[in-house]
Image (cartoon, helix red, strand yellow):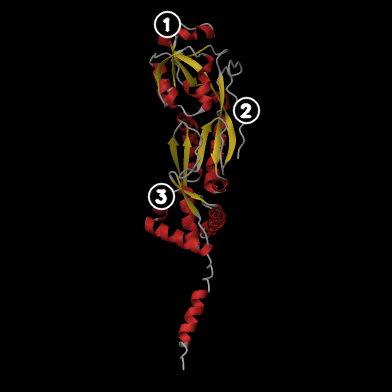
Amino acid sequence: MPRSAPGICKTADMKAMTPEPLRRPSADDLLVLLAVGRTGRFVSAADELGIDHTTVSRRIAALERALGGRVLARASGGWELTDLGRGALAAAEAVEAAVRSLGADGGRTLEGVVRISATDGFSAYVAAPAAVRVQRRHPRIAVELVAATRRASTQRSGLDLEVVVGRPRVLRAQARRLGDYCLGLYASRGYLAEHGAPDTVGELHRHPLVYFIEAMLQVDDLDLASSFAPAMRESVSSTNVFVHVEATRAAAGLGLLPCFMADRHPDLVRVLPDKVAVRLSYWLVARAETLRRPEVSAVVDAIDELVTEQRHAMLGATAEFPYRTAEFPDSPTE
């Protein structure tokens, strides 16, 4: 007569057939996701949290098992949040806020690292003073500035805020106009003494232009800015606007320079101010979840303050006489 299998085997079979229920996500795992979502990298998140990157990987894997799906997807330059990950990030932010509120004495202390990518001139004369202002108000906030003149990134791994020239096309991010600034033509007093000043735009072809390297310029608005005098030959070109300023001061030619930078130097003279004034705009780009972080909001507020305070300097003394204004049809913010 056949014998049945022991009862323990039947129980084991039934357990094997029953799917493992999803467990509640760990608060620690959510905080790890928060760090990876902000930095875009496991190693950077590990450094921020004081753990090793293999622990970060294990925490993310545990969170994905708990949620039943992927919270991160590989992207160029790092990791991006999936839709599930963005949903989990809101819970992670709530956990962080609750943890920070513990031990708060009479008010919340803001802390953390905020990383900004901005053009060279904006970084030096707006973002850096704004960072100092933030640190005076909130000593535990650190601001990191990455100086770069480029389009808004398609993947924002490792960046909290971006400041770009011209309205950007962005995905899964918000873009808003910070303010306008003007480019003008400048020359050193020594250059003008030797070569004379042009009286009309038509005479500009006799002078060399100090500006960006055309083949390496990634920003359309800046590329079009010099089109008022296409016959001007190139002199010293660079990807860095501070090189433009110093080359112009060294009599390399006429520099197409931001007014808020050139007007700081008494040895530079504005050329054709009533005919050449290229008006451009700075735009701030960030993810919505990034802007919800209090320390990021504090930095954005300080940047807004500096832009407002420097509005007239950024537009230049004669910006009311624009010869060419580099304004283009609005691109949709997606």
Residue 145 lies, with reference to residue 265, above or below; the image says: below
Earlier residue among tags 1 and 2: 1
Question: Which residue does the numbered mark 3 point to in the structure image?
Answer: 44
Earlier residue among tags 2 and 3: 3
Residue 241 lies, with reference to residue 272, above or below; the image says: below
Rendering coords of residue 249 (x, y %)? 41, 17
Rendering coords of residue 212 (x, y %)? 44, 23
Q: Considering depth in this image, is 82 or 38 the residue closer to the camera?
A: 82
Earlier residue among tags 1 and 3: 3
Q: Residue furthest toward the bottom? A: 1
Question: Residue sitting at 50 percent across and 16 percent down?
Answer: 185
* Quadrant showing the C terminus: top right
SS category of the residue bearing label 2: loop
Q: Considering depth in this image, is 149 or 5 the residue closer to the camera?
A: 5
Disc assigned to residue 329: 2
* Residue 212 visible, this orientation: no
Rendering coords of residue 210 (x, y %)? 43, 18
Q: Residues within 10 Å of mark 3 (few under 14, many from 20)?
A: some
SS category of the residue bearing label 1: helix
Q: Distance between the residues labelled 1 and 3?
A: 53 Å
Q: Residues within 10 Å of mark 1 (few under 14, many from 20)?
A: few
Q: Quadrant of residue 332?
A: top right
Question: Which residue does the numbered mark 1 point to in the structure image?
Answer: 195
Disc assigned to residue 103: none
Q: Distance between the residues labelled 2 and 3?
A: 39 Å
